[in-house]
Image (spheres, rainbow, N blue to C red):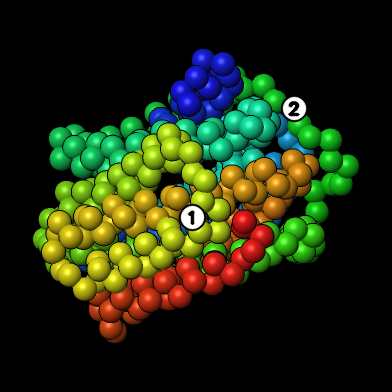
Amino acid sequence: MFKLFKENRYFLRFFLSRFVSRIGDGVHSLALLWIAYKWGKSGIIIAAVMVAFSLPGVLVSPLAGQIADRMRRARIMAATDIVQAVCVFALSFLAFSHALNLWNLIAITVVMSVAQGFFMPASLSIVPQIVKQEEITKANALVQIGSSFSILIGPLVGVSLIALIGLPLAFAANGVSFLLSALLLYGIKTVALSVQAQVTSFIASIKDGLNLIKQHPIVSRLIGKAAIINLFYGSVTIIIPLFAGNIYHMGAKGIGFMMGAFAAGIFVSSIVMGSVRITTSDRIVVSFSTLLMGVMFIVFGTLCNFYISLLSLFLIGAGVNISNVSIISVYQKRLPDQVLGRIMSFLGAIALSLLPVSYALTGVLVSLIGTRSILIVSGIIIIFMSFQMLKIKELN
């Protein structure tokens, strides 16, 4: 599997860029959640920051997909990395000068979300341009291994940085990782695809995405179910800092360990998927991994113990990753490259569009029914959707 690094230097550059920037992402995510919790110790403020982190990227993703199908995808990724580097250096400066507040944090987070919205479709659709058709699944698994390992150590690095040298340098570390990632991506040589249509309006982008999805049954059958799962899966992001702070009283350290457990599940499952030849149909793999995720939501909400929470988050991360890698690989193999960027961005927009709703809804419901009830209800609905996945014959 690792032979791909020796044979393909462009893929090696792509892999390393994702690895270093994901470490910075882990540091940055921990810092954001810790600041939001520290300022208000409530779900509403955490939700406000996370909505700013996700919603703008969703709104620009249809346009971003068109651009990914018309320009060099590596250059798009490098440019957005530079924008995000500038943003986190600005956060570092504001934190150092004690001028950081909720409003400028949200404003800068919105800019980063827009940049990430352009980054994602290019990132998800570049693999078929730099590896052979028969190597796509292995390449995706390797990317997931590197990304999940870097996400695993990112929060732990973040905890150490905040404890040893403070929040400003934690933000600065993320800025350095974005710049290094941009440098690596700039060296990847790909060609822009010859798509004749011009970049259209937002409404036209939506119509274009819907038309493309109708032409590919495997996409149309999955899209609604994935969106519902994301609506209820998103609650865990808001609940982690609340559990770490209000229930376990562990502060930033607790957030770091809980985020790390989730990332460890992604990392271990990525290694298994990249090393073991899976002969079971994609339908069974996706359904079982979604079922696992739902069951662990219920365990997380029912058994209030720190170590059981870590185990639950580990298995939730494994379930999410197995399902995502399987679905992305199916799309990359079966969809034409000329439309892959648009379809991937539109799918991302639909699947992620409910995350801001999930964050906001969770922030409000925390004060009404409590964190544990939210986890249990989310788990039940995710389990139901796992059985719906079994009915998608196109995944065979």
Residue wearing tag 2: 191
**Please, what secondary structure does the residue beneath circle 1 have?**
helix
State the residue lying farthest toward the left: 249
- The image shows residue 103 at horizontal and vertical percentages of 40, 59
Disc 2 residue type? Val
Q: Quadrant of residue 161?
A: top left
Instruction: Tell me if residue 187 can be seen.
Output: yes
- The image shows residue 390 at horizontal and vertical percentages of 54, 67
**Please, what secondary structure does the residue beneath circle 2 have?**
loop
Q: Residues within 10 Å of mark 1 (few under 14, many from 20)?
A: many
Q: Mark 2 vs mark 1: which is more N-terminal?
A: 2
Q: Residue at x 51, y 59 (%)?
A: 284
Q: Residue at x 59, y 45 (%)?
A: 329
Q: How many marks?
A: 2
Residue wearing tag 1: 285
- The image shows residue 45 at horizontal and vertical percentages of 33, 66
Alpha carbon separation for disc pair 2 and 1: 34 Å
Left or right of 161: which side holds 136?
right
Q: Residue at x 47, y 33 (%)?
A: 142
Q: Residue at x 61, y 66 (%)?
A: 392
Instruction: Tell me if residue 357 can be seen.
Output: no
Q: Is the residue 192 above or below the residue 363 in the image? A: above
